[in-house]
Amino acid sequence: MDGIHDLGGMQGFGEVGYSPAEPVFRRRWEAVARALLVVVAGAVKASGGEFRHSIERMEPGHYLTSSYYEHWLTAAATLAVEHGLVTHSELEARAGGWFPLSGPVLAPPVVDVGPDVDTPRFDVGDRVRVREWHPPGHTRCPGYIRGKNGTVVRVDGIHSVPDIEAHGTARRREPTYSVRFDAADLWRDGQRGVWVHVDLWDSYLERS
Amino acid sequence: MSVRGYHPAPASPVEQRVAALEALLTERGLVPAGFIEEITRRYESEIGPMNGTKVVARAWVDPQYKQRLLADGTAAIAELGFGGPEGDHMVVVENTPGIHNVIVCTLCSCYPWPVLGLPPAWYKDPPYRARLVREPRTLLAEMGCPLPDDVEIRVWDSSAEVRYLVLPERPPGTEGMTEAELADLVTRDSMIGAARL
């Protein structure tokens, strides 16, 4: 989905709240949220795609105004409700007020996924173009490179396609690649001497 | 009754929401005794940047290890005993006088846990994720890491299964130092690429 999480290249956020040192958990609830996510993801057997999509579906205003530990809490609670471990009203009763969950899945479950792809279509040095498409569900193809041309710099392992595993129990495995883009090709105001590398599944790409 | 939708009513405080989920999952027998304390302890004292500093120091003192590290990061990092979730497919990228590497996850918070631990808040927040792929020179300078114009910047967006670790340059004047002393010089942010040593 073209969601709020797909932040690459967005403008207007201002300075990074940079700190060279900070505790892993600033408050105890952050550690608890972290642990509960592990508990829920294990109990419902969430794939990486399903887990990430449960964060991506957060209401955009909530996403932008909450910390990542709160994203993890919201993901854990959303998955727990969607898989029937707890109900939303139970959560709100215990919390003593509104307990925001992520929004509904917009994409239909994927049933017919086609065969695994065992052989990489591209080699190091090949020019490729990123498909220009806007799937309603989960994808690991950032918006800022869609339709752009790049060069394969590394052929990586064969992995389950997140777009499929996020939406059902079916799986398809494909080769993955690291693709290099010249910042000048990505942005009108791209900075000189900058290469941006994005790691992409085979079906995200076509020959340039 | 709370109002839902685009402009929701204020949520109950986050501590209360966490406590609510914890209580309900515990009542259902899903949270093993001591599990939360164990997760806390592990990420506070075992899984963190102190592991990455050992990898970097070893690469600085042992050219053959460095070669293995750059050829197969996962295997070379495992030689030092580090591995696990978010570290199963490691690629180590080397800084040189003319090349500066820096890592980001524009879509979420992907980060090499076994060598760096859980990411700092700024790495997961929108400004860093939005700006690093668009204006890295400006952003790194703002963060205290200005780079000369003739230094090439390589940004690595961790969007699939690979997780990255930056191998910073060994600082000058450290020739006589031991491996342990060198490890103490290495900072978390130099292994992200948000700082130089």
Image (tube, rainbow, N blue to C red):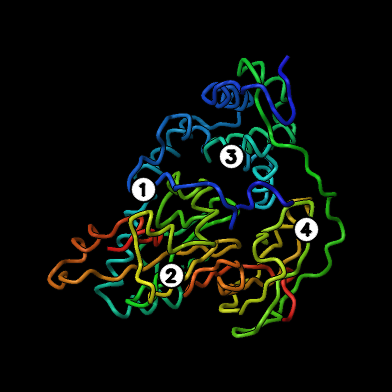
Label 1 amino acid?
Answer: Glu
Other-residue count near label 1 (Cα within 10 Å), few / some / many at <14 / 14–19 / ≥20? some
Numbered badge on residue A64 = 3
Numbered badge on residue B46 = 1
Label 3 amino acid?
Answer: Leu
Q: The C terminus of chain A appears in which quarter of the rendering?
A: bottom right
Mark 3 lies on a secondary structure that is helix
Say which chain tag 1 marks. Answer: B
Does residue A110 sit above or below B8 in this rendering? below
Does residue A115 sit above or below B54 in this rendering? below
Same chain letter for marks 1 and 4: no
Say which chain tag 2 marks. Answer: B
Q: Which residue is depicted at the point 63% across and 42% down?
A: A41
| Quarter of image, res A149 | bottom right
Does residue A196 sit above or below A60 in this rendering? below
Label 2 amino acid?
Answer: Val
Q: Which residue is depicted at the point 38% across and 39% down?
A: B41
Residue B94 on image: x %, y % = 39, 73
